Amino acid sequence: MHQSRRPHAPRFRPIVRDTWLAVAVAVLGDAAPALAQRVDDNAATSAGDAFGQAIGNERVGLYTVDDVRGFNPVDAGNTRINGLYFAPVDKPPNRLIRGSKVRVGISAQGYPFPAPTGIVDYDLSASGQADQVTLGFERAQFGSRVFNLDVLQPLADGLKVYLGGAIRRQNRHEGGDFKAYVVTGGLSWQPYAGASLTGFYGRNRTYDDEAAPSIFPGGDYLPPEIKRRAMIGQSWSKRDSTQELMGALARLPFGKWTFEAGLFRAERRFDANFTDLFLAMRPDGTTANRIMVADANNLDRTVSGEARLTRTFATAALAHRLIVSFRGRKGNRRFGGVQRITLGESSLNFADERPRPVLAFGPDDTDDFGQATLGLGYTVTAPGRFMFDAAISGSRYRKTLTFVSAGLVTSVRDRPVTGSVTGSVNLTRDIAIYGGHVRGFEELAVAPANAANRGAVPPAIRTQQTDLGLRYAVTGALSVVAGVFSITKPYYNLDEEANYRELGSSTNRGVEMSLTGALRPGLTVVLGNVLLDSRISGELVDSGRIGPRPIGSIRRRSIATIDWRLDGGRSPLSLDLAAESFSSRIANVSNGLSAPPRETIDLGARYRFSLAKAKGLLRLQIANVFDDYGWQVAANGAFQYSVGRRFLAEVRFDL
């Protein structure tokens, strides 16, 4: 046994303590990202569909980077930076990324090497084209304060520098607060027309972040309604983490050939981590079994990238594209060695503070992995008529898990072959049908904190997806997309002994719909709806030991965003409304408990103005106007209450 000591976190000194004006965040929850966003950026008016897009600190659409068609594409490793493959350890540091796009259905048509869980494509701030000096002051939820700065400026002909940063003191919706800062930078060089070389670095530090309780009901009943913003965690359970992402990208066209490459190094460190488990909760909000899981010295690191050679050529009627790609990743994780601190009898109804224990951690376990993939893709397009895309990839995969305390070493090796066939056909000038079949090879999330084998990493899994849909251009500015899909994967969760393992097979079948665009000048809508049927099959379901639906699954999600800029889009004032509705959510393994349906409405306004030579934006918002109280349920069955009504404001300047 050895004792680990968390380094003392520096005191947070906001450099704008007396000058902050207000904040800006559209509904991203507790730790909403503050990204490189300009005065005129607007996620709603720039959305091409309702399936998920983020620009700066605004998000719109049915899906997020955490949840696409009922699965998590970041955990699966289906992420890209400027279209090139990279293996994440978490979402990229805020400000390093200008925005993101979820690619599913028709937006994945023709996209190189699609994936069954969908792809999250991040847009790198340092590779932007327009010169920028943007200064932002925010007053976020419950009095949180944020200052951010983005600079993208030329140094010489074809050479630009990007610098970005943010300082945040966030008041959490569960009570308590945390501090964070972000530092990012990059250089981008355009040696000749169409070519670019970009290098970047980002660092995100979060500290003094108290762990809120994760609640697990002991039966088929909901937790009692806990008073919002009351800190009922342990004051000493302060988490401290640092994330870094650095890399370089190249795009070099020569004739009909284009060479693209990206190399990325991602790392996340937890100097201190705590999980507050409120197990077997009684109906009155008490438990005889509250456990604090303490952890430290954790590390997650990957080096990944892609080199891609593309050849384009055309005939009188057809355009062809041939891609040869090499993708790879190598990484390691340090985990385990946790200390489980039994707090015993406790209650959610008041702050049940306990003395800080002496922390002593066991030896760390390790996970080493590597994968190399060679892919070949071909696309043929007849403009205005059809598009056909096919790809095939072969991989060599290895993973070695070393459990030191158990003296156990487990190795997995695999050589999967994956591929895709997708296409679309224009039936008329305004109507197109699309579809495809994709086979993938993906990672899974690690075993959660309430698992007996916490931190264990399952082997990679084989997945597949089939989808079919239609797009109808109602007008030149308004389009409808409707489609069906089916995704099949192995299903991992906790068994009766709380071991995280494969329990069967899961299939998510669904119908998704999108109506997006301008109804008239100045009036933009983003409407979306997904109906989802998530099922588990296998021996445990057949024997009645687990229910047929996965924990956390829903039947329906609907969103509506309306942005109205007055005077036909010419007024400095615009008003916006965002509504979101969820069906009930499966909340335990037997399917005997569900979290009730939830609906929220947000109202906002933007006012654009000039101050000297600067363009300015004042954005105000009331989120969750009717203070809806609901429950969020994680995939492991943990309950946390939803964020209440909050007043948000921001002032932003393009200098």
Image (cartoon, grey):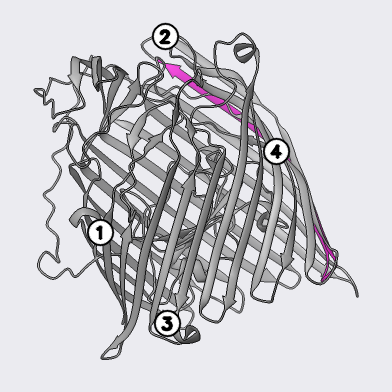
What predominant SS class does the magenta segment belong to?
A: strand
x and y, in percent, of residue 263 in the image: 52, 52
Task: Measure the alpha-carbon separation of dots 1 and 4.
Answer: 39 Å
Q: Secondary structure at mark 1?
A: loop
Residue 228 appearing in the image: yes
Q: Secondary structure at mark 3?
A: strand
Residue drawn where x is 48% and y is 48% of the image: 581
Query: Which residue in the protein does label 1 denote?
Result: 140
x and y, in percent, of residue 484 in the image: 71, 46
What stretch of residues is rendered in magenta? 378-403
Say few, some or many: other residues with alpha carbon within 10 Å of mark 3 (under 14 / 14 to 19 / 20 or more): few
Residue 127 appearing in the image: no
Q: Nearer the viewer, residue 8 or 16?
A: 16
Task: Measure the alpha-carbon separation of dots 2 and 4.
Answer: 41 Å
Amino acid type shown at disc 4:
Ser
Query: Which residue in the protein does label 4 denote?
Result: 486
Of the image marks 1 and 4, the number of the one nearer the N terminus = 1
Say few, some or many: other residues with alpha carbon within 10 Å of mark 2 (under 14 / 14 to 19 / 20 or more): few
Query: Which residue in the protein does label 2 denote?
Result: 407
Task: Measure the alpha-carbon separation of dots 4 and 3.
Answer: 51 Å
Q: Nearer the viewer, residue 452 or 307?
A: 452
Query: Which residue in the protein does label 3 denote?
Result: 156
x and y, in percent, of residue 365 in the image: 38, 21
The image shows residue 129, relative to residue 468, as above or below, that is: below
Residue drawn where x is 68% and y is 52% of the image: 105
